């Protein structure tokens, strides 16, 4: 237990970096007990911590992803049937791009290739909501039990959502050009270990450039929440006394756009201010799964009825998950 606590606090959470940042800023004459000093400390510490973890995780996940190019993923999914295919699709979503806008082109490609619609939607739900990086980052803030529970319920939501769409036979509500697109089989090249490392390095560079602005925005919002917004306000809106906190957090998260790396600093600040765990996780899920830009992109591939069904399934699922986490928060934290 002591060893795991050390890993969680000092390796994943990098508490030593927080202390070092505080010492450095104090040496520059900033008051760490004041709002401005506390905000700067929170901002620098979280940006540095997330940047280090992000680059490491992108490298590792991209190296794993090099074994699952779209052509191979399509073949794997094509060999499975029923709910097993939905489970495999959701699991494949954990080693694919980091935001919903990146996942939609793959969803379109899989759908065009003739894979069952429910299977492709399980992938679409899982890919932005749950990935290996989210597991590590959530462990660094909330602990192992919360991180594992988040991943499990995220995968369950992806499987359930895809299965429901499959049962409702929504294929006619996919845009015509997607359904009639031909499938071109391109044999994925076999990469050497050196080429996989190079691929992972390139992914680190390109992904970091895309997500870093959102990290800065997320950490900035987190710093404001952490040091400038009274705790009583957060507790009143997102705490246990507000039965509509989960619904409010979900609705607020939907119009936003970020990946999980940008939402974690906000979640960290909200947790410190007394927001309930399920409410925080509902906000994170809404931002990563139902962001407005990704819904605009998805509308180009599916008709309004299917888009509305997808949004409805995800929204109800997120609210349900948030309420369950709130109900059993005492077991997780």
Image: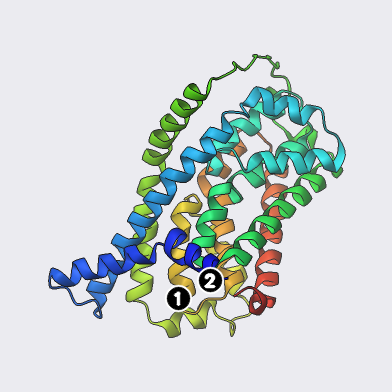
Residue at position x 59%, y 15% from top?
Answer: 189
Q: Quadrant of the C terminus?
A: bottom right
Depicted 305 relative to depicted 284: above or below: above
Q: Is residue 211 left or right of residue 24?
A: right
Residue at position x 72%, y 39% from top?
Answer: 89
Residue at position x 48%, y 45% from top?
Answer: 57
Depicted 176 relative to depicted 101: above or below: above
Q: Nearer the viewer, residue 252 or 72?
A: 72
Can I make out residue 40 in this image? no
Q: Position of residue 148 (x, y in %)?
A: 64, 60
Can I make out residue 274 in this image? yes
Instruction: Calculate the distance from the C-alpha at mark 1 to the C-alpha at mark 2.
Output: 23 Å
Q: Is residue 73 left or right of residue 293?
A: right
Residue underneath mark 1: 272
Q: Quadrant of the N terminus?
A: bottom right
Q: Which mark is residue 2?
A: 2
Q: Position of residue 30 (x, y in %)?
A: 17, 73
Q: Is residue 47 left or right of residue 26?
A: right
Q: Position of residue 145 (x, y in %)?
A: 63, 66
- Dot 1, crowdedness within 10 Å: few (<14), some or many (≥20)? few
Q: In what element is the residue under mark 1? A: helix
Depicted 83 relative to depicted 50: above or below: above
The way the protein has been coloured in the rendering is rainbow
Q: Earlier in the sequence, mark 1 or mark 2?
A: 2
* The quadrant where residue 147 appears: bottom right
Q: How many marks?
A: 2
Q: Nearer the viewer, residue 8 or 88?
A: 8
Q: Position of residue 72 (x, y in %)?
A: 68, 24
Q: Nearer the viewer, mark 1 or mark 2?
A: 2
* The quadrant where residue 55 appears: top left
């Amino acid at each position: 237990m002591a060893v795991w606590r050390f890993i969680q606090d000092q390796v994943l959470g990098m508490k030593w970096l927080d202390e070092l940042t505080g010492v450095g800023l104090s040496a520059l004459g900033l008051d760490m007990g004041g709002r401005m000093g506390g905000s700067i400390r929170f901002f620098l510490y979280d940006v540095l911590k997330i940047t280090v973890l992000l680059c490491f995780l992108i490298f590792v996940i991209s190296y794993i992803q090099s074994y699952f190019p779209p052509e191979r993923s399509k073949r794997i999914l094509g060999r499975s049937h029923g709910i097993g295919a939905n489970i495999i699709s959701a699991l494949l979503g954990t080693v694919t791009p980091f935001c919903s806008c990146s996942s939609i082109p793959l969803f379109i490609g899989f759908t065009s290739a003739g894979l069952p619609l429910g299977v492709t939607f399980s992938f679409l739900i899982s890919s932005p909501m749950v990935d290996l990086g989210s597991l590590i980052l959530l462990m660094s803030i909330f602990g192992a039990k919360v991180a594992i529970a988040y991943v499990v319920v995220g995968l369950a939501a992806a499987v359930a959502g895809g299965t429901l769409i499959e049962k409702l036979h929504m294929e006619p509500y996919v845009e015509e050009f997607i359904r009639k697109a031909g499938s071109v089989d391109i044999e994925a090249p076999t990469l050497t270990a050196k080429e996989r490392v190079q691929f992972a390095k390139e992914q680190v560079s390109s992904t970091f450039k895309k997500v870093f602005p959102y990290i800065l925005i997320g950490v900035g919002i987190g710093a404001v929440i952490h040091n400038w917004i009274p705790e009583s306000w957060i507790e009143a809106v997102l705490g246990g006394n507000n039965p509509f906190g989960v619904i409010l957090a979900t609705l607020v998260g939907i119009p936003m756009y970020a990946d999980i790396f940008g939402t974690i600093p906000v979640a960290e600040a909200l947790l410190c201010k007394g927001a309930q765990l399920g409410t925080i996780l509902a906000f994170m899920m809404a931002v990563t799964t139902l962001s407005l830009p990704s819904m605009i992109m998805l509308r180009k591939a599916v008709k309004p009825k299917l888009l509305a069904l997808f949004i409805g399934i995800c929204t109800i699922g997120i609210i349900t998950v948030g309420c369950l986490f709130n109900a059993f928060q005492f077991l997780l934290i």
